[in-house]
Amino acid sequence: MHISIPSILVSLGVKCLLNWVMVVSQKKGNVCRGFMGVFGVSLALVDTVLTLSLTALHFQADGVLLGVRLTRHHVCLLSQLAGKIYGVLQWPVVVLGFLDCYVTLSGQGTSTTTTTTATITARLHRVAPVPASTLLWCSALIYLFLLSDFYPALGEEHPYQLHRCWVFLSSQVLHVGTVIVLAVACVLAYVHKEPRRTVRHFRPRLPSPGEPLTERDRGALSRRDVVQQALATLLDTWTWFLVGLAALLLLLPVGIPGYLSLNVPWLCFLNSVLTAVVLSASCPASRLTRGLAAFPLDSFCDWRLGCATGTNGT
């Protein structure tokens, strides 16, 4: 698909603005607390450098850097490289984000480990997102340049006559979005099998942090109840995003420009979805005796559900 260079620059500028708005709007201390936060900050930095570089190349289209003559062809080349890298990163980001959520929740719900072991694990988990994000970017670059069949489509136009770039479309983000929309639809069907409860209005009494749970509290929450609450919490924040995603899947079934396919708002949404999945799958009744704790890695949803994930409230 051909897109004019000014349109590419404007869309990247808007993307950078949204990236930093989402980074700044997160709760203090949560931005770099997990993998999604650290990777989101790194993505915002990469997008900013990319946008400034493409803008400089567009307006100063005849320069030399390290012996290489820079032209507007490099605008197209960099935008194509960025699109391919962002497409490669989609599923690895989902997998690593899920593992990060699962490890965090498991660490909060474990009461049998010693204090020393728990401290070491917590420190490793705080440090791990930075090398994991770095390794992910490096792996994507290595795959693109050494293992993939990527070949740039620059055309044969003279640099001063070049006003449009061929942009690769990314279908990976639509694949991830399709899986999420279908999963939400299936969960809605699952929770509505029980006729007298709705996702929006079902809210059992939640004990205060540290308050011991009674037998009534323990028996009041089944697996379906936990799934209902997790879905309700997710929809309270991201309903319109999901509606827009479903519309995008219907209107653009082929793909979207690759350089727009990975952004911080999308990562924040993925983080909330993965949090809901982990909480729904990892809150057996046996953990209800351990108190109530909020899930710490999501700044947009309040995950204090009627199931316990730790011993201290946050």
Image (tube, rainbow, N blue to C red):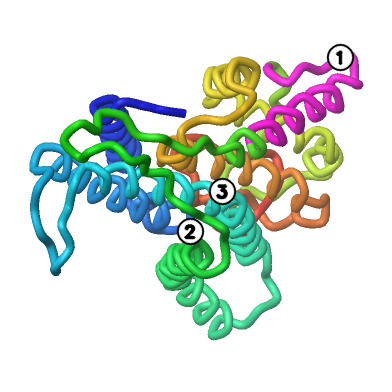
Q: Tell me the amino acid under the disc marked 3.
A: Gln
Q: Nearer the viewer, residue 34 or 225?
A: 34
State whether the magenta stretch is mostly helix, strand or loop: helix
Give the residue pinned by disc 1.
Answer: 196
Give the residue pinned by disc 2.
Answer: 35
Tell me the quarter of the picture where residue 208 sits: top right
Q: Tell me the amino acid under the disc marked 2.
A: Phe
**For the point 86% across and 14% down, which residue is it?**
196
Tell me the quarter of the picture where residue 138 sits: bottom left
Do the residues bearing badges 1 and 3 touch, measured as CB atoms within 8 Å?
Answer: no
From the top left corner, tell me how far across and down residue 270 is, in percent. 56, 41
Mark 1 secondary-structure assignment: loop
Mark 3 or mark 2: whose residue is earlier in sequence? 2
Q: Nearer the viewer, residue 88 or 185?
A: 88
Mark 1 or mark 3: whose residue is earlier in sequence? 3
Direction bottom: furthest residue = 116
Tell me the quarter of the picture where residue 312 sits: bottom right
Q: Nearer the viewer, mark 2 or mark 1?
A: 2
**For the point 45% across and 64% down, which residue is it?**
141
Q: Nearer the viewer, mark 3 or mark 2?
A: 3
Whether residue 9 appears in magenta in the rendering, the answer is: no
* Residue 246 in view: yes
Eyeballing the image, is 179 above or below 198? below
Side of 93 relative to 67 (left or right): right
Give the residue pinned by disc 3.
Answer: 90
